[in-house]
Amino acid sequence: MPPRKLYFENVRVGDELPAMAKSPIDRVQLSRYAAATNDYNPLNIDELQAKAIGMPSVVSPSTLGLGFLGQLVTDWARGGQVKKAAARFTRMLWPGDTLVCKGRVSDRWGEGGRYHVELDVWAENQKGELVVRGNVTLKVFYSFEDETRFRTGQPPLIVNVPRESILVAPPAPAASPAGKVSAAKGKVSAKDSRKPEKKPAKKAAKPAKAPKAKAKKPAKAAKPAKRKK
Amino acid sequence: MLDRAAVGRTTPPTLNEVERGAIRRFAEALGDYNPIYFDAEYARASGFSNVAAPPSFPISFAAGSDLRELVGVPARNLLLGEVSFEYERAIVAGDRLLVTSRVAEISDRPGPAGRVEVAVIEDEGRDEEGQMVFRARRSYVVRLTRES
């Protein structure tokens, strides 16, 4: 059964990734993660040592939360390739913490036959506190046809799509979902802001469709001229 | 205290063989059962050349030197504040990557409870032909404990 793919043409700025709830972090998971990363920091696995230095219990490596965000993204990206990922850890992770990972498309652009989607991602603990936030850049095919061209050694489909987050200023208060979450613990407000963002996305998407009539090379060369190496 | 003279300190390239079993155990530890991490055929149909490694997998790489050797403070006193990765291509099972780490920055900055010390480590992984595969950047702050 071939995996379903995520294509650029189906992504819009403002799209939300389905929220992903993880099972509570437990000490068995911390042991397995220590083994998998070959990092046996005693504060992650040895309760006595952790308490000896004044901590309430072992603590989870913050990168575990990063791994969860990776899962959120790869589940959604279905074959899209992660080009960049950056994360900032804002709160310690403890055994018993149950994280919910969320994300949203913050930008997309196509240039010279390469298509990128940028995501804001973040995770909240069971108290609604932000524990990690980051952003991810994915490389995807424009469409099934673009992928087929790649697989058969043909030149890529070229549709130039300018960065939308620059063209369309995001609604002021909703600029950073992560910031908002930390400021207001407001899951609800995060949802409210979804609609205003979708409209500009659609508008910007239209010019993308027009040049889709994948002309032959000469025509393409003209358009991305300023970016040609 | 971080060793201020550590800036520029670089570990020798250390070979990391990306084993399929290591990928599987890493994904299992995350509770992530995406078949691209377990099933080579599925991974190929998804556009990878073999079983893929999860995006945060480079965390598991050894770089020939631990943090204490690099910056003069044991790992348990360092709190990871930020991390970023950049990939030239996906890391897949069978890769043989030479990983080096370099101390990029030692500084201090104001924190909520006085000044905090910060160490930034940059890693890179290349294949055996010398092609860049990934870069990483890790920022640590020194954690104050009862001992220190």
Image: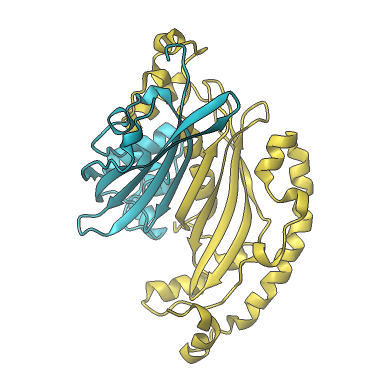
Of residues A5 and B88, which is closer to you in this image?
B88
Q: Is residue B53 left or right of residue A87?
A: left
Instruction: Please tell me which residue is depicted at 76% across the width and 55% down the height of the picture.
Output: A171
Instruction: Please tell me which residue is depicted at 32% across the width and 51% down the height of the picture.
Output: B92
Residue B132: % across, % down: 30, 57
Instruction: Please tell me which residue is depicted at 54% across the width and 84% down the height of the picture.
Output: A214
Q: Colour of chain B?
A: cyan
Reply above or below: A34 against B20. Answer: above
Q: Quadrant of the C terminus of chain B?
A: top left
In the displayed orientation, state which residue is furthest to the bottom: A218
Residue A92: % across, % down: 54, 26
The image quarter containing residue A14 is: bottom right
Q: Quadrant of the N terminus of chain B?
A: top left
The image quarter containing residue A223 is: bottom right
Residue A208: % across, % down: 63, 75
Residue A72: % across, % down: 54, 44
The number of discs equals 0
In the image, which lettered chain appears yellow? A
Picture colour scheme: by chain
Q: Is residue A134 visible?
A: yes
In the displayed orientation, state which residue is furthest to the front: B5
Q: Is residue A72 left or right of residue B83?
A: right
Q: Is residue A31 visible?
A: no
Reply above or below: A139 against A143. Answer: above
Instruction: Please tell me which residue is depicted at 60% across the width and 41% down the height of the picture.
Output: A122
